[in-house]
Amino acid sequence: MEGVTDNRVTIRRAVESDEPALLDIELTAWDASSGFPSMTEGERAGFFSDRSGPDAHLVAVLDDRVVGYIRLQDKYRFREGAGVLAVNGLAVAVDARGHGIGSALLTAVTEEAERRGARKITLHVHSSNTVARRLYERHGYQVEGTHPREFLIDGEEVDSLTLAKFL
């Protein structure tokens, strides 16, 4: 992963010492159109968890600062689902947007999935998150399904879309 760069953006595997920067991104990058406000309320001690440690994350570094992440995990824990990976989060720091970081992370995750021998990558996105949807579509993701009125966010019903990319 170390070799994936886009000018000043470098993509690498996360390490434990990235946790404070990743937590800051997690708590500030989302809004009601892209995430769940309840997930950023209250105190959170850390970003990593038992199921979602550094090895599940690729991070984007811009000018020696961690400015984004993408979380890639096995979608299923049984052998019949082997080869299907899920992007369970992609976020870029608000002040670092517009530098191609999301695109660099998606390119790197595709390379990682291919390295692992995956056949498919899936993800979920709010129908209201048009910026992310366009980004995913540019990277070859297609809508596989719509989950109407899946969430109630700030009093508004929001559809969830399932997107997939076949490798």
Image (cartoon, rainbow, N blue to C red):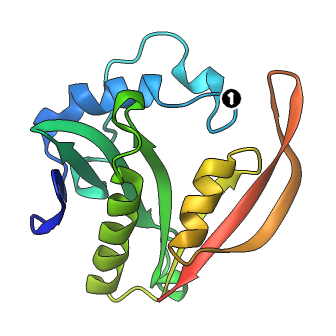
Residue 55: image location, x then y, percent: 23, 56
Residue at 15% across, 51% down = 8
Residue 111: image location, x then y, percent: 30, 78
Badge 1 local density, few (<14 within 10 Å), some, or many (20+)? some
Residue at 33% across, 47% down = 99
Per the image, label 1 sits on a secondary structure element best described as: loop
Q: From the viewer's perspective, is 28 left or right of 39?
A: left
Residue at 28% across, 38% down = 67
Q: Is residue 122 visible?
A: no
- State the residue in front, 142 or 54: 142
Q: From the viewer's perspective, is 80 left or right of 46?
A: right
Residue lying furthest top in this view?
A: 42
Residue 144: image location, x then y, percent: 74, 75
Q: From the viewer's perspective, is 123 left or right of 112?
A: right
Q: Identify the amino acid type marked 1.
A: Ala
- State the residue in front, 5 or 161: 5
- Tag count: 1
- State the residue in front, 117 or 92: 92
In this rendering, the answer to whether 87 lies above or below 50 is below
Quadrant of the image for the N terminus?
Answer: bottom left
Tell me the residue that label 1 is attached to. 32
In this rendering, the answer to whether 33 lies above or below 154 is below
